[in-house]
Image: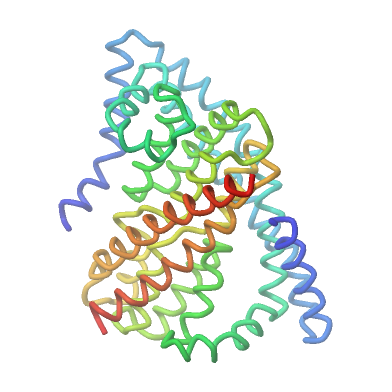
Amino acid sequence: MVNIIWAFLAIVGIVYAMFNGTMDEVNKAIFESANEAVTLSIGLISVLVFWLGIMKIAEEAGILKGLARAFRPIVVRLFPEIPKDHPAIGYILSNITANVFGLGNAATPMGIKAMEQMKQLSGSDEASRSMITFLAINTSSLTLIPTTVIAIRMQYDSISPTEIVGTTIIATLISTLSAIMIDRIFYYRSTWRK
Amino acid sequence: MIFISQVSIWIIPLFIMLVLLVATWRKVPSYELFVEGGKEGVKMAFSLLPFLVGMIVAIAIFRSSGALDAIIGLISPILLFFGVPPEIVPLALVKPISGSAALGVTTELIATHGPDSFIGRLASTMQGSTDTTLYILTVYFGAVGIRKMGYALKVGLLADLIGIIAAIVIVTLVFG
């Protein structure tokens, strides 16, 4: 699916540029955006190194296991395929906690670690049920404080920059709950087929 | 509100302190473990690089050719019929695909319509309420080498759609 979308974006863009006379812009965009993507990846190194370093200590010190035990009831229900004391549960919880507090950059490395653990559990290059549930929760973003948006609103002299926090929380809760439900519906549909 | 913003400032330093306290208490070699974990971070950033370059360039081609604007022009009459303001359409379409592009669209909408306008509030709510499905899919599955994604993309995009509808309904109810 990603292969199709990816190729579609580029092919349609180039074909459209032929008729729209924007080939010059496209040509420029290819190299500028590639450059931008590399800068972004390099920029990720600092955060990834620091958080994975801290998380490694947390893991060895048994903190992730402690977290996993505390929130076990909820997460075990959401991820029935993962054994109760598996480190994946701890990473999933750290990822969700970081997202809730708006630490998107801190959430990513923990999310990737969670994925690694889940891949070890499934042992194939196919997305497992838990991986998809985890992605569904992540893509619907459980943010409590939309810091970037508040900052932009402040820049444009909003009377009340934080007034959208309430509506954002409600919208987030609805999208996360529906993501979990949609994920369940798709899972049960796929098991019925088999 | 003040409490929540205070919590978000304190949480990272407190978390680091807690980790280091527990590690020292349990006689875990904290600095050595930090370095060990950090090395994984370097590897991870480099393994992400080609995924990001590929996706960001494809989106840039699509945007710069004018194809994105053309699609928005095609779709907006249908959405207008359902009471969705057409100004918001670019954001709704870009949001699942590219986070930085969506932030750009949100900033532009807030600048044009004002942060306290209906469009400004709706854009702000939408920006905060869903994440970029395609980016998360690319990064998470890419980093661990998942090739068959199953129904993950469908679930993510459907949840995005519901998030956008929820944002429109709630902003209309609260600020309408």
Q: Which quadrant holds the C terminus of chain A?
A: top right
Which residue occupies 31% across, 84% down?
Answer: B117
User: Percent from the top left, x then y, of residue A48?
Assistant: 51, 37
Which quadrant, please, contains the N terminus of chain A? Answer: bottom right
For the point 74% across and 61% down, which residue is it?
A4
From the viewer's perspective, is residue A121 above or below residue A147?
above
How far across and down, in percent of the image, does residue B24 sit? 31, 13
Report whether A169 appears left or right of A106: left
Q: Residue at x 80, y 74 (%)?
A: A14
Q: In the drawing, does residue B40 fall left or right of residue A57?
A: right
Residue in the image at 68% along x and 62% along y? A33
In the rendered image, which quarter is residue A170 located in? bottom left
Point out residue B35 in the picture as x, y percentages from the top left corner.
50, 21
The answer to which quarter of the image holds residue A169 is bottom left
Whether residue A178 is situated above or below residue A49 in the rendered picture: below
Is A59 on the left-hand or right-hand side of B8?
A: right
Q: Nearer the viewer, residue A6 or A23?
A: A6
Q: How is the image coloured?
A: rainbow
B117 lies above or below A87: below
Q: How many marks?
A: 0
Identity of the residue furthest to the top in this view: B27
Question: Which quadrant would residue A131 be assigned to in this image?
Answer: top right
Locate residue A31, reporting x and y percent. 74, 62
